[in-house]
Amino acid sequence: MAFSQLRLGKRHRWVTSLMLASVMLVMLVQVGYAATDLSYFEKAKINWRQYAGETISILAFTNPFWSWCGNAIPQFEKLTGIKVKPLVLSESEFFDKQMVSLTSGSGEYDLTYLFSPYFVWQYTPGGYLEDLNKYVSDPRLTDFDWYNVDDFYPAMLAMGEEKGKQFTLPYQVETCLLHYRKDLFKESGIGAPPKTLEELHEVAKKLTTDKIYGFDNRGALAPGPMMTPITGIYYAYGAKDFDEDTLKCLVNSPESVYVMSLYAKIIRECGPADWPTRYWYERNADLQAGKTAMTTDCDLFVPVFEDPEQSAVAGKLGYAVPPGGPSGIMSSAGGFGWAIDSASKHKEASWLFIEWATCPGVLLESSVSGTNMVPVRKSVWESPELIARMSAWDEFREALSANLEKYARVLDVPNPKNMAARIRKMEALQEIWMGYDAQKVLDKCAEDIDRMMKEAGLYKP
Amino acid sequence: MRTKSKYTPWFLVLPALLIPIIFIVIPFFIGVAYSFTNKNVVNPNTAFVGIRNYKLIFSDPSMLWSQLKVTLIYTGSSVLIEMFLGFGIALLLNQKMRGQKFFRSVILIPLMAAPVLTGLMWKLMLSPGGGFAVVNYFLSFLGFKPVLWLSNPRIVLYSLVGIDVYIYTPFVVIILLAGLQALPEEPYQAAAIDNASEWFIFRKLTVPMLKPLILLVLIMKLIFSLKMVDIILVTTRGGPVRLTRTLHVGSYIEAFNRGNTAIALATMTVLFVIIFVVCLVLVNVMQKKPTEV
C-alpha cells in the first residue's frame, strides 16, 4: 500500500501529529537562529562568504558573554558559510589550555579571547598573537565605515594594543564594584556602603551570621582572584607590585603588608571557611542564593545577579565604587578581547568571526538581550535600550559611570610576567589567611617574583 | 636449510617499538634537553644554561623539597592503604558467599569513571555546605560540625589520599582477586590435611605464591601515586598554599601558570629519576627466585 493510501486511526493521528510538531519545533529553533535577519550584516560592503566551507576552532570559557555568543554562532555560520567548532572550558582550565595552545605553535585553536592587557603582555614577546591591524585595514575583509572602529572607546582598544600593533579587539570591559545587599544594610541600620577597607571590615563583621557571609570573594590559586576583586583597593593604599623603572617586585612594602593582612583578616573573620578553594563560580552561587552580604568584583556579573530566574537577590543588590584608601579610590580595569593565534591556518576566516562578534549590532544585542557587560562601544553604552535595561538595576549605571570616568584604569606595571606574579601573590595571600606572618610571607613572595623576573630577563638587579 | 638472521626478532618488534619511541622516548629526551635551557613562555630566545634550573629547584625549599615531601606523604599513605585494603577485599571476594557476583561488580564502579570526574564529584561531596555537601550532611547526624575537608591545612592532603583510595583500591582488588583465583589448589589441600591454621596458610602459602603479582601491583600503584596530578588539580590545585602540591602538580603550575617551561621540565626529570629508581629496586626484588611452597 502506498504511503499516501495509509489511513491512520484517530489516536495514531494525534500521536503522529504531536511527534511531527515536536520535530518541526526543534528544527525551527535551530533554523530560527540561522534564519535570523541578516540584512544588517549585508549592508557591509564585503563578501561575507569568501571563506565559506572553512572551519575555525575557538577556545572559550563559560562566562556571561559566551553564554550569549555561543548560542548566536548559527547566525555567523549562516552568514558566512564558515563552520565554527568551539571548545568551552571552566576558567582555570581555559587559562592553562590557552597557554599550551598559543605557545605550542600548533594553531590548534584559531581564535581565543584574552583578558587584556595582562595576557597581551604575556603572549606578545613570543610572537604568539596575530596583528589584527592588517585585517581591519583590508577593504576585502572589513568595511571600515560599517564596522566603525572609532565607535570603540580608545581606552578599551588600547588594552589590546602593544607597540603599535592591535592584538585583541574587545567585546567587553570590566571594572571593580562593591556589590552589597541593600536589604541587609537596612535591617542592620547601616547607612552608606563602606568607603575604606577598615569600614568594610567593620560592616562585614556586623553583617556576618551563621547563615550569611559578611564578605566573600574568590580565593582559589588562579589569575582571576588577584585581579579585579582586590587590585584597586591594593593600589589605593599605596601598594604596588613592581617598580615602574626597574621592575623590582614591591609586594613586601609596608603598604602591601597592611592591605594584604587586613584583607585576609576580613575574609577569615567574615568569609567562607573554604575560601582557598573557591572560584567566582562558587562565590556567585552563594551571592545569588542570598548567602553573601558584600563582595567586590567585576561589574560583568550584574546581569546575572539581577536576573530573577537565576538569582534570589535580584532587586536587592546595591552597587558602589570600591572602597578607597589614602591614595584615593581606584579600580582595576581589564577587558576580554578576541585574538587570532599567529599559527592559525584560517586567519582571514577567523577575522570575519571577530568582525561579526564585535560589530556594533552584535555587541548591542549581546548587552541588551544577553548578559555581556560592560559595553566597549559608545553606541552601545549610550543606546536607549541599554539605558532602559540598566535603569532596573538600582545604582549600577551611576556607580559604573563613576568608575569608567574617574577611577578605573589599568593599574599594573606592564610586563609579561604579570599574571605569573599575580598567582604567586595569591599563594601569599592564602598563607596570610592561614595565619602566617605577613611580612615574612611577602618577603619570600617578593624574592620568588624577583627570581622569576630575572629568569625571564626582565629584571636586572 | 634457511638460517634465521639474528636481526629478525628486532625487525619483527620494530613496528611495535616505533610508537613508544616516537611518542614517548624522543619527547622525553627533548624535555630533558630543554631542562638545561632557559625556555620560557615570554622569552622567545632559548639558551643553554647548564644545571642552573636544577640548582634552583634544589636550593629553594619551597620548590622541590616541599613538593617531594608532599609527594612522599601522598604516595606512602595511598599505596599503603590501598594495598592492605585491596588485598583484604580481594580475599573476602574470593570466598564463596551470597551476592559474590554482585559485590565483585559493585567494587568496580569507582574505576568506571575518569579520575578527573571522580575528583570533581568528591570536590562537591566534600564541600563544607550547600546542596552537594553529602559527607558533612551525614556527619551532622552524628553531631559533627561541618569539616573543611579540602581547605583545612591539617587534613587536606589526607582528604585527597581518601579520594585516591576510593578510585584505585578496586584496581588492586581486581588484580589480586584474579591472582587468588588462579592459585593452585593442591598446596591448600595439603595444608588442610596437615590441619594448618588460616593465618599459617595465608602467611606461608597465599602471600608467597601471590608475591610476583603483589609486587607488580605495588609497582603500578607507586607509579600512579608518584605522578598523581588529575585528582589534585580538579580539587585543590595544589593548594591551599602549597600543601597539596606534589612534584607533578608543582611542575604543571610552573609550566602552565608561570610559563617557566624549563624549570617545570627539570622538576619532571627529577620525578622521572625517582620513579625509575623505585621501579628498578622493585623489579629486582620481583626477579629474585620465587619462593617454593
Image (cartoon, rainbow, N blue to C red):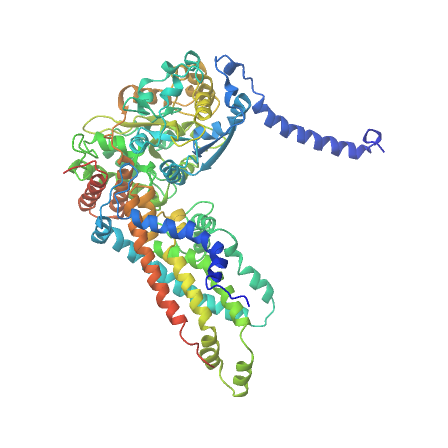
Residue A122: in sight, yes or no?
yes
Is B196 displayed left or right of A105 in the figure? right
- Establish if B95 lies above or below B16: below
Name the residue nearer the viewer: A98 or A55: A55
Q: Residue furthest bottom?
A: B194
Residue at coordinates 30% horizontally, 55% vertically from top-left? B270
Q: Position of residue A77 (x, y in %)?
A: 53, 25
- Establish if B262 lies above or below A326: below
- Establish if B120 lies above or below B11: above
Q: Position of residue A396 (x, y in %)?
A: 37, 23
Q: Position of residue A109 (x, y in %)?
A: 43, 34
Residue at coordinates 56% horizontally, 63% vertically from top-left? B104
Q: Quadrant of the N terminus of chain A?
A: top right
Is A100 displayed left or right of A370 in the figure? left
Is B157 displayed left or right of A242 in the figure? right
Q: Residue furthest front?
A: B1
Q: Quadrant of residue A18?
A: top right
Residue at coordinates 39% horizontally, 58% vertically from top-left? B225
